[in-house]
Image (spheres, rainbow, N blue to C red):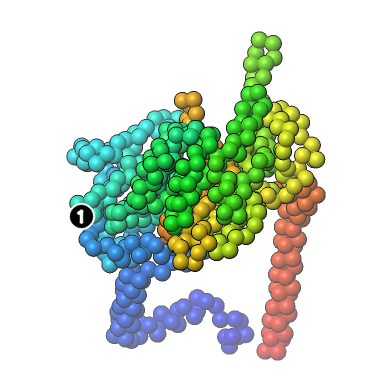
């Protein structure tokens, strides 16, 4: 308070501070130099010891332990060259910015063994030739500008060079899990020996071209060896056996080959169709693969029933009205969308998988020396087709069709198959459908949901005891469907959204008013005392 009883203003305080500052210029200069030095040292420490607080649930902006392990095993420097066009569309520009940040953190973790450089093929013919030689080509995109859609060619590729090895990422999609892609590429160069997956063919399985989306990504980290005749045995180089959607029964010698492979510590991935379905005429015929007795040794059974589920996918059904054709979009419970998953490496990061004509995978008994885990379940409104297989998508479904709940559709098993403690440990993953990995039929290709492929890749990684990159694979790309609520709760939420902000503002205004009146009363009392 000043002598006349008026509060001292901020301007007066600032004026007195400035007068004191310039009354001793030598000390002031010394103080400014000291402050500047502290700021420089602080910035230097912060730059070389970057600290980030990652609050994302999947730790998206934190290097994984597996990535850091790969970086620590680098023997030679790595040169990462990004070929980016300028003036990228917003989503691609964001991906380029995230890549730069990721590389900077990787470089720090690798003791600066990673060198990053960026080239612009759109402006330099020399850089364009370098990109072409590396296998990076321009991609034409539709870009919206000023309410118009124009086509633009952009470069968005990356190369990694390590010694005599080079990995190429020809085109980076904005939704790609960048750390997974970079860590996988580094892993292939640092650890050149890749596990071998033996893909069984010759029993009515889908051709490799029909599973190209899955196999192309599998080939990224594994070598694929086609096995056309199991009677000749399984090569010793094969680490994991994959049997996907066989329609014909394996012969007894082939069944024995598979059994011996697992009894000797082998690993296997089974995605089995229990039925050969034909939605066109509405028929379903039971398929006997010859693997039933082998699965029984693990205490597992793929049941001879079809699952129908309220949580299902939409299908297009053609119709005819006079001379005009049309397509109906209807929900088809025989194509269930599975969203209930166990806390297990095989299902890590998986949010939803679309199966087709799925059968339950049941644990019928618990064998000694074998550990079993159910991996996924149907929704709480599900049902089973046991004998009357009506596959017509236009049929009417009633509540009595969905009286079951949470039926298991996948199982992971690990243990000693031969029942002898001295025998090596085997492992097996089983799903009651093989069609979920087919992305092409009859010459027509369609893109599978990302999690369909991720689920199978996770299973292969778990069987190979290589789960370090599983969590990275599903970063960014996973879908997060909204939780459905009933109509009463929707009404309550709607009213709360309207009323609560009004109440909050009213409460805030009331508190401010009370504080203002209290402060005013105190000032009046103080002024009265001074007078």
Above or below — where is 139 with respect to 174? above
Q: Position of residue 251 (x, y in %)?
A: 49, 38
Above or below — where is 305 with respect to 510? above
Q: Secondary structure at mark 1?
A: loop
Residue at horizontal 42%, vertical 62%?
A: 64
* Mark 1 nearby-residue class (10 Å; few <14, some 14–19, many ≥20): few
Q: Is residue 32 left or right of residue 437?
A: left
Q: Position of residue 485 (x, y in %)?
A: 73, 49
Q: Within the image, what quadrant is residue 297 found in?
A: bottom right
Number of numbered tags placed on the structure image: 1
Q: Position of residue 218 (x, y in %)?
A: 41, 45
Q: Which residue is mark 1?
A: 163
Can see residue 271?
yes
Q: Is residue 302 left or right of residue 49?
A: right
Q: Position of residue 529 (x, y in %)?
A: 70, 89
Quadrant placement of the N terminus: bottom right
Can see residue 93?
no
Front in this rendered view, residue 3 or 98:
98
Residue at horizontal 58%, vertical 88%?
A: 3
Front in this rendered view, residue 456 or 501:
456
């Amino acid at each position: 308070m000043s002598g006349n009883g008026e509060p001292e203003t901020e301007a007066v305080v600032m004026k007195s501070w400035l007068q004191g500052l310039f009354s001793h210029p030598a000390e002031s200069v010394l103080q400014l130099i000291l402050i500047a030095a502290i700021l420089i040292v602080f910035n230097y420490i912060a730059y070389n010891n970057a600290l980030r607080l990652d609050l994302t649930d999947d730790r998206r902006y934190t290097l994984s332990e597996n990535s850091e392990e790969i970086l620590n095993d680098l023997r030679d420097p790595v040169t990462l060259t990004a070929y980016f066009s300028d003036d990228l569309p917003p989503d691609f520009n964001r991906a380029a910015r995230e890549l730069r940040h990721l590389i900077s953190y990787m470089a720090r973790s690798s003791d600066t063994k990673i060198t990053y450089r960026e080239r612009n093929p759109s402006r330099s013919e020399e850089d364009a030739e370098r990109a072409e030689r590396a296998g990076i080509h321009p991609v034409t995109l539709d870009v919206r500008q000023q309410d118009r859609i124009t086509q633009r060619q952009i470069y968005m590729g990356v190369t990694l060079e390590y010694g005599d090895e080079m990995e190429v990422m020809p085109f980076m999609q904005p939704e790609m899990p960048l750390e997974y892609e970079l860590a996988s590429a580094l892993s292939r160069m640092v650890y050149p020996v890749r596990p071998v997956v033996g893909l069984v063919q010759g029993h009515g399985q889908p051709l490799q071209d029909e599973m190209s989306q899955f196999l192309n990504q599998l080939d990224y980290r594994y070598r694929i060896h086609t096995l056309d005749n199991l009677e000749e045995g399984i090569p010793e180089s094969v680490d994991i056996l994959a049997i996907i959607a066989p329609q014909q029964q394996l012969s007894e010698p082939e069944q024995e080959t598979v059994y011996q492979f697992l009894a000797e510590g082998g690993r296997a991935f089974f995605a089995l169709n229990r039925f050969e379905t034909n939605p066109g005429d509405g028929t379903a015929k039971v398929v006997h693969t010859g693997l039933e007795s082998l699965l029984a040794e693990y205490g597992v059974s793929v049941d001879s029933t079809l699952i129908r589920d309220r949580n299902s996918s939409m299908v297009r059904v053609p119709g005819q009205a006079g001379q005009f054709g049309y397509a109906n979009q209807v929900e088809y419970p025989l194509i269930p969308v599975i969203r209930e998953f166990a806390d297990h490496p095989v299902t890590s990061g998986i949010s939803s998988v679309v199966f087709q004509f799925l059968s339950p995978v049941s644990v019928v008994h618990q064998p000694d020396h074998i550990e079993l885990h159910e991996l996924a379940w149907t929704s709480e409104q599900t049902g089973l087709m046991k004998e009357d297989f009506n596959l017509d998508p236009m049929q009417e479904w009633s509540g009595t069709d969905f009286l079951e709940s949470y039926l298991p559709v996948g199982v992971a098993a690990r243990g000693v198959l031969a029942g002898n403690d001295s025998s090596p440990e085997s492992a097996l993953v089983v799903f009651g459908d093989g069609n979920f990995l087919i992305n092409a039929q009859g010459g027509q290709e369609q893109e599978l949901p990302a999690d369909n492929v991720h689920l199978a890749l996770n299973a292969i990684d778990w069987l190979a005891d290589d789960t370090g990159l599983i969590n990275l694979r599903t970063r960014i790309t996973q879908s997060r469907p909204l939780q459905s609520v009933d109509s009463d709760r929707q009404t309550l939420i709607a009213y709360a959204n309207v009323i609560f902000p009004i109440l909050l503002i009213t409460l805030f205004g009331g508190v401010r008013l009370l504080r203002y009146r209290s402060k005013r009363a105190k000032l009046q009392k103080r002024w009265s005392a001074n007078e």
